[in-house]
Image (cartoon, helix red, strand yellow):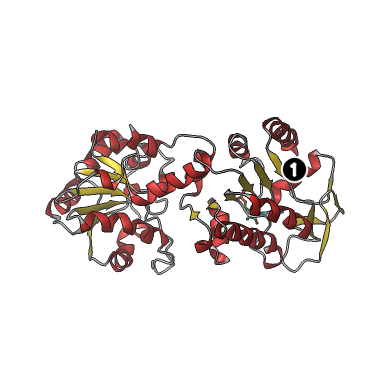
């Protein structure tokens, strides 16, 4: 796996695919700069060696050129974070980009305009990728969040750098952390899969059964399993057409010697609302008119035991409707168990939009081993897919 340390960037122009797809408020100010901060180590390292940096990214989902999706809005934030004035090219290809790239001196940073102002980016157009490639000497991919897309800047461009291509530090860390869970994991390995639906996690579950010793299934997925096993789930969320699949997963798990842990009790509510009435009930005996919205105390006790014994932990998806304060307890408790197990030496990886949001919201970010920056990309890796953006560098 080639990374920055395989190259000397002195007097070289690095063209880096970053993920600067940051949220902007109505006045076009950056409201969360995490993704820019995440790319800083790679940029710093190249500048420190006497190289220069050309940054390319998408922002939002523009249909053609849309002023509100211009990357110029993030220039000030990027300059502040990187500690150097970031120059801007008002187009990512053509003479504007070429001239700006040509003039770039060692130690300088140039940001290209939104790649998705050209439909060729998402189409993976070869000629467009070639134009981008012509701007730099070495291609660096540090955008894990888009590595599952075979776009021009994430994948196709790599063919124009037969040897001069590598992963950035963020991307390398992501791959390394996922490999620690999927390949070189210390046992026992536990995966906690929560969230709303079995259907969106099924491929992950199937792939991961070969790699784990324990699987904790929580969140809304719980009820499809419980109903399939003959339990009464009241008005809880359920995918009736996935019941057979749930039973098949349980059968497969048994065959592979994976212990499955499902909540035994839940916090049930008489409405999907934070101020609903609640009661703790057996997961198999939820009364009609009530729905399970969080894991109950006995379930959490069981989960704690598993987590504390684990040496490798993967967490994707909340244990309850954590967006509502009264149903966040299970997710917070689980986060704390993982934090405690991590402080005892376990390796823990948290990924997927909602669990990352939960970890941040509850202040656990620094207490787990690694928080993945790529939701969809991480899920696809967990599904066992080879991401095109990764394959293009490994070629
Ligand atoms: P996902 O996007 O599949 O990871 O699902 C995340 C969503 O699942 C969050 O918005 C949670 O509120 C929701 N969720 C978790 N537990 C439940 C539950 N018991 N009932 C309904 N939704 C849930």
Residue positioned most to the front: 344
Identify the residue under disc 1. 224
Measured from the top left, where is residue 375 in percent x and y?
50, 49
Residue 307 vertical position relative to residue 224 in the rendered view, above or below? below
Residue at figure coordinates x 70%, y 63% from the top left: 327
Q: Is residue 239 visible in the rendered structure shown here?
A: yes
Instruction: State which quarter of the image contains the N terminus.
Output: top left
Ligand 1 within 8 Å, label 1 CB: no
Category of crowding for the residue at label 1, using alpha-carbon neighbours closer than 10 angstroms: few (below 14), some (14–19), many (at least 20):
many
Q: Is residue 362 left or right of residue 289?
A: left
Instruction: State which quarter of the image contains the C terminus.
Output: top left
Q: How many marks?
A: 1
Which of the 4 quarters of the picture holds residue 46? bottom left
Which of the 4 quarters of the picture holds residue 86? bottom left
Which of the 4 quarters of the picture holds residue 160? top left
Circle 1 sits in a helix, a strand or a loop, which is it?
helix
Residue at figure coordinates x 69%, y 46% from the top left: 217
Which residue is at the front of the view, 93 or 379? Answer: 379
Measured from the top left, where is residue 337 in percent x and y?
63, 59
Q: Is residue 389 left or right of residue 368?
A: left
Q: Is residue 195 visible in the rendered structure shown here?
A: no
Residue at figure coordinates x 16%, y 48% from the top left: 12
Measured from the top left, where is residue 270 in percent x and y?
81, 61
Which residue is at the front of the view, 350 or 20? Answer: 350
Measured from the top left, where is residue 229 in percent x and y?
81, 39
Q: Is residue 383 left or right of residue 243?
A: left
């Amino acid at each position: 796996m080639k990374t920055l340390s395989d190259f000397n960037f002195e007097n070289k122009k690095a063209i880096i695919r970053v993920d600067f797809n940051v949220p902007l408020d109505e006045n076009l100010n950056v409201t969360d700069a995490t993704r820019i901060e995440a790319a800083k180590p790679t940029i710093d390292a190249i500048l420190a060696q006497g190289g220069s940096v050309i940054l390319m990214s998408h922002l939002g989902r523009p249909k053609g050129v849309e002023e509100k999706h211009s990357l110029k809005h993030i220039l000030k934030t990027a300059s502040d974070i990187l500690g150097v004035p970031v120059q801007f090219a008002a187009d990512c290809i053509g003479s504007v980009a070429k001239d700006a790239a040509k003039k770039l001196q060692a130690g300088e940073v140039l940001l290209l305009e939104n790649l998705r102002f050209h439909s060729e980016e998402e189409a993976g157009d070869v000629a467009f990728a070639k134009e981008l490639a012509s701007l730099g000497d070495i291609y660096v991919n540090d955008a894990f969040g888009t590595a599952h897309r075979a776009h021009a800047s994430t994948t196709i461009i790599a063919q124009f750098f037969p040897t001069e291509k590598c992963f950035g530090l963020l991307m390398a860390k992501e791959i390394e952390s996922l490999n620690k869970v999927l390949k070189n994991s210390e046992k026992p390995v536990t995966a906690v899969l929560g969230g709303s639906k079995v259907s969106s996690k099924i491929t992950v579950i199937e792939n991961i059964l070969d790699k784990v010793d324990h699987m904790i299934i929580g969140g809304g997925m719980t009820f499809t399993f419980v109903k399939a096993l003959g339990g009464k789930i009241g008005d809880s969320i359920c995918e009736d057409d996935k019941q057979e699949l749930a039973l098949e997963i349980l059968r497969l798990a048994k065959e592979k010697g994976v212990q499955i842990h499902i909540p035994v009790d839940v916090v049930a509510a008489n409405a999907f609302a934070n101020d609903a009435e609640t009661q703790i009930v057996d997961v198999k005996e939820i009364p009609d008119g009530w729905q399970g919205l969080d894991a109950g105390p006995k379930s959490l006790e069981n989960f704690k035991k598993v987590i504390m014994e684990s040496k490798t932990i993967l967490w994707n998806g909340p244990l309850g409707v954590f967006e509502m304060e009264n149903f966040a307890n299970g997710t917070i408790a689980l986060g704390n168990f993982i934090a405690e197990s991590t402080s005892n030496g376990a390796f823990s990886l948290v990924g997927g939009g909602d669990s990352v949001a939960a970890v941040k919201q509850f202040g656990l970010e620094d207490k787990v081993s690694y928080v993945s920056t790529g939701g969809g990309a991480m899920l696809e890796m967990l599904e066992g897919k080879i991401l095109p953006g990764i394959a293009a560098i490994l070629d």
